[in-house]
Image (tube, rainbow, N blue to C red):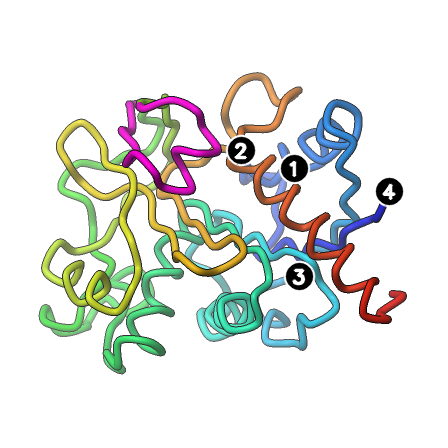
């Protein structure tokens, strides 16, 4: 069995519930699924390091991050390097931001939590009309998407802890450059994004790590772990013995 190296990007804190869930989820993946992940926490200011030796990147909640630039660098490295990637909550928000700036050419696109004075026309991630802190809802997934394949159902419960989301004004530009929005909530607001053609590149505004009692990983997290193990096998196969 190949041990896969996963970069957990975020400013680790016991006050962030999703962070405290991670060790139990990794143990469950190992025990229940036989997926062995060697996890490394990488603080946001250090996330612009070379990630070539990792088999997956998970940008966890906890925004505002101490370094927006570090988080965006980690997302870009995963996207361009074909490294399996998952971004949840703040990770989802910054996934859209990275894609807008580096793929869509929207150089001034910003996150209003990081830059409260940003011009309205450049605000990609904005305060939600109704905060989702502590909210539970339902997300409907698009048939044929990676998310639908992993979840195996059309509708899935979702737990949130956020107050920011994507501005509808900019979604068409992201779609035009290849990002797909494959999950929406009850109101039709975007809640899942994925990048076709990438080995695994997915973001959710909700936090799948908060699903259940923490003894079994959410299918999207299991999907990331499976992709990471496959990446590790391929990496070792071409001579990387790390």
Q: Nearer the viewer, mark 1 or mark 4?
A: 4
**207 is higher (above) or lower (below) than 53:** above
Give the residue number, with chain letter if any, for mark 3: 42
Give the side of residue 148 with respect to residue 21, left or right. left
Q: Could you tell me how far apart the alpha carbons at marks 2 and 4 are, in whole angstroms?
A: 24 Å
Magenta stretch: includes residue 140: yes
Task: Tell how many labels.
Answer: 4
Give the residue number, with chain letter if any, for mark 2: 209
Q: Could you tell me how far apart the alpha carbons at marks 3 and 4 are, in whole angstroms?
A: 25 Å
175 or 92, nearer to the observer: 175
Q: Nearer the viewer, mark 2 or mark 4?
A: 4
Q: Are marks 3 and 1 in contact (CB under 8 Å)?
A: no
Give the residue number, with chain letter if any, for mark 4: 1
For label 4, the SS is loop
* Residue range highlighted in magenta: 137-154
Q: Residues within 10 Å of mark 4 (few under 14, many from 20)?
A: few
């Amino acid at each position: 069995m190949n041990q896969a190296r996963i970069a957990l990007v975020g400013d680790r804190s016991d006050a962030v519930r999703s962070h405290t869930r991670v060790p139990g989820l990794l143990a469950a993946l190992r025990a229940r699924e036989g997926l062995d992940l060697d996890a490394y926490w990488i603080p946001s200011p250090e996330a612009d390091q070379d990630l070539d030796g990792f088999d997956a990147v998970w940008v966890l909640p906890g925004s505002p991050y101490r370094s927006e630039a570090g988080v965006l660098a980690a997302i870009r490295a995963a996207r361009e390097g074909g490294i399996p990637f998952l971004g949840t909550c703040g990770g989802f928000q910054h996934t859209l931001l990275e894609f807008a700036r580096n793929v869509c050419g929207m150089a001034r696109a910003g996150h209003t939590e990081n830059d409260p004075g940003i011009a309205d026309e450049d605000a990609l991630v904005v305060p939600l009309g109704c905060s989702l802190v502590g909210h539970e809802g339902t997300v409907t997934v698009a048939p044929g998407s990676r998310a639908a394949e992993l979840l195996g159902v059309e509708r899935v419960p979702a737990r949130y802890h956020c107050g920011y989301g994507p501005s509808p004004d900019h979604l068409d530009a992201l779609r035009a450059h290849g990002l797909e929005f494959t999950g929406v909530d009850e109101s039709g607001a975007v809640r899942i994004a994925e990048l076709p053609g990438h080995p695994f590149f997915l973001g959710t505004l909700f936090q799948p790590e908060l699903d259940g009692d923490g003894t079994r990983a959410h299918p999207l997290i299991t999907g990331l772990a499976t992709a990471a193990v496959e990446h590790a096998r391929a990496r070792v196969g071409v001579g990387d013995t790390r």
